Amino acid sequence: DTHTAIEMTNWKEYPRNQDVNGGCKTVIESFTRLPSLLHLTLDFEECGNNRFNDEGWKGVGQLVTHFSTTLTNIRLNFSRGSIRDGGLHILGNVIRMCSNLTHLTLNFCMNSISDTGVGEITRGLSSLSQLILLHLNFDKCLRLTD
């Protein structure tokens, strides 16, 4: 059986000061029991308020890595402070493994990102030979110096 899509949204509704990393890890572990996956949408808008950290991004990385040969479409929303350079490093490393990826949307709007973080994503994108559509949003990002 092929599962066509997973969509996780409304993490911003997760109770303030709760362990969103643990909650995300539990949900992601259950997804890895699926035999395959074509489309993945994760909306982590405003998770910065819940201290979503590199440990949480490792869970996201594990999910994408698990389905790296079957995923064709990934949409990830990290807007409003939910990602930093450590998360971009993890994301860049796992995205480069998605050999069949044709559509990729990454929203980094309103985050604090350094040149190093942007470089991590760039390196990840450079190996996507099947990519047809790429949408990157860095609107209103605070540029940190390395």
Image: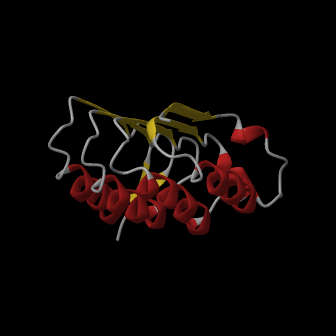
| Drawn side of residue 17 relative to residue 48, left or right | right
Instruction: Decide which of 131, 80 is in the foreground and name it.
Output: 131
Type of colouring: secondary structure
Quadrant of the drawing holding the C terminus = bottom left
Residue pictured at 44% horizontal, 45% vertical: 141
Residue pictured at 75% horizontal, 55% vertical: 23
Residue pictured at 50% horizontal, 35% vertical: 1
Instruction: Decide which of 59, 11 is in the foreground and name it.
Output: 59
| Drawn side of residue 106 relative to residue 125, left or right | right
Tally of numbered tags: 0
* Place of residue 36 in the rendered image (x, y in percent of width and height, measured from the top left): 46, 43
Residue 140 in sight from this viewpoint:
no
Q: Is residue 108 above or below residue 48?
A: above
* Place of residue 37 in the rendered image (x, y in percent of width and height, measured from the top left): 46, 39
Q: Is residue 85 above or below residue 83?
A: below
Instruction: Decide which of 90, 29 is in the foreground and name it.
Output: 29
* Place of residue 47 in the rendered image (x, y in percent of width and height, measured from the top left): 66, 48
